Amino acid sequence: PDHVVVVGASLAGLRAVQTAREAGFQGKLTLVGEEVHLPYDRPPLSKEYLAEGPLTDNHQFPDVDSLGSELGVDLQLGVRATGLDVAERQLTTTAGTTGYDRLLIATGVTARTLPGTDHLSGVHVLRRLDDAQAIRGALDARARVVVIGAGFIGAEVASAAVARGLEPIVLEAAPTPLLRAVGESGGQGLSRMHARHGVDLRCGVAVAEVLGDDRVSGVRLADGSEIPADLVVVGIGADPATGWLSGSGLTVDNGIVCDPSLRAAENVWAAGDVARWTNPLFDTAMRLEHWTNAGEQAVHAMENLLDPAAAAPYSHVPYFWSDWYGQRIQFAGLPIGEPEVVSGSWDTDNLVALYRDGDRLIGALAVNRRGDIMKYRVQISRRGTWEAALAFAAKRNAISA
Ligand code: FAD
């Protein structure tokens, strides 16, 4: 190809253009991104960035400055893609219309907001740097914090608030948080960390209204009770950023639907949080919102884009981490069924729990067991058996005893 265009200038977009140059692509390479910033790293935004002390800049990717100068990428920042015509190979953006030979889409996801709160200051989602800046400012001002949603983002914001001596209240609509991410007992078990670290988590609680005129003043629950607040952080999930693709010719169904090689259509590939593909390792269609996948998938998609004749399917063991109250939670694989605790317990910040699908090890959840999780991830990638996983766990337990 002569001209490769990448839409979405975050983790996946960055890794895609870097991969193109590493693979020897010398043609025109364009990176289009709606945000005005150079690509930056999101995980620190709900962690170190919110912590007390001087503001850290560890959300900067160290290699990002070389994009324009060394890699010769045509950086179009502050530019939003608004339309695509796959048949004509034309991309429309707020800066005009451009043709491409091959296109890689990495537009990620957009955080869900709470309806009816747009006019209220002090109500924030946490997806972008500007969101993190606003939340950090409110924490600095010692806000009374209410977090809506006890998912990973909500839990991390609560952790940051409590680390600063604040008393956040976390409201969760479902009876069990994180059900889809880690299963029923996994969600129950992990959520007990909140109480252990002094945070008030209330599950099965419906928010009727967020109160305030211009500024938020509190939250009214369905039972009529009110909780005062200066900061409300909404962590209720995210949706794929695909609105601009209507009429494009691509299939969109909870993400951009791709084949196992990450191809969405003739000359179009997708990667990162926006991409849905059939993962050959599990023979299952999935869309992940995990940092590790976004980077690895972008590398893979760009390699396939540059050499479609040699395109290989993308096999991947999902992996993510989250930091709560200074404790590291990690998950690998799929949360099928209910996990079995094989080491430690839910009542400590130290545990390994495994998930099975018949005779096969399918998932692993760990708290503060960094050495173990990657070993289970390898076993999952090799389609290891449940029996072998239990034997491995017993061996590890014997060593640590
Ligand atoms: P995104 O990072 O969502 O980037 C997409 C980019 O495309 C955005 O910059 C967006 O503005 C741009 N865009 C969207 N639409 C358009 C358009 N029409 N035109 C042009 N540009 C567009 N994962 C973990 O595994 N562990 C963690 O601890 C963890 N912590 C996280 C903490 C926070 C606060 C957040 C927000 C995410 C966290 N994640 C974590 C998830 C991880 O950051 C994502 O998986 C990763 O950012 C996905 O990268 P991406 O490039 O696919 O999409």
Image (cartoon, rainbow, N blue to C red):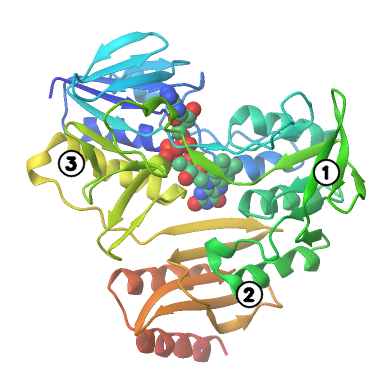
Name above or below for residue 159 compared with residue 69: below
Tell whether label 1 touches label 3 (CB within 8 Å): no
> Where is residue 246 shown, x and y percent of the image?
37, 27
Quarter residue 186 falls in: bottom right
Say left or right for 163 vs 397: right
Q: CA distance from mark 3 to mark 1?
A: 46 Å
- The C terminus - image quarter: bottom right
Residue pictured at 47% horizontal, 68% vertical: 335
Q: CA distance from mark 1 to mark 2?
A: 28 Å
| Residue 319, numbered circle | none
Q: Is the distance from the Cβ of mark 2 to the nearest ligand 1 atom less than 8 Å?
A: no
Amino acid type of the residue tagged 3 in the rendering: Asn
Amino acid type of the residue tagged 1 in the rendering: Val
Q: Which residue is mark 1?
A: 145
Q: Which residue is mark 3?
A: 304
Q: Is the distance from the Cβ of mark 3 to the nearest ligand 1 atom less than 8 Å?
A: no
> Where is residue 315 shown, x and y percent of the image?
27, 58
Amino acid type of the residue tagged 2 in the rendering: Asn
Q: Say what secondary structure mark 1 lies in.
A: strand
Q: Say what secondary structure mark 3 lies in.
A: helix
Q: CA distance from mark 3 to mark 2?
A: 40 Å
Q: Nearer the viewer, mark 3 or mark 2?
A: 3
Quarter residue 387 falls in: bottom left
Say left or right for 4 vs 400: left
| Residue 350, numbered circle | 2
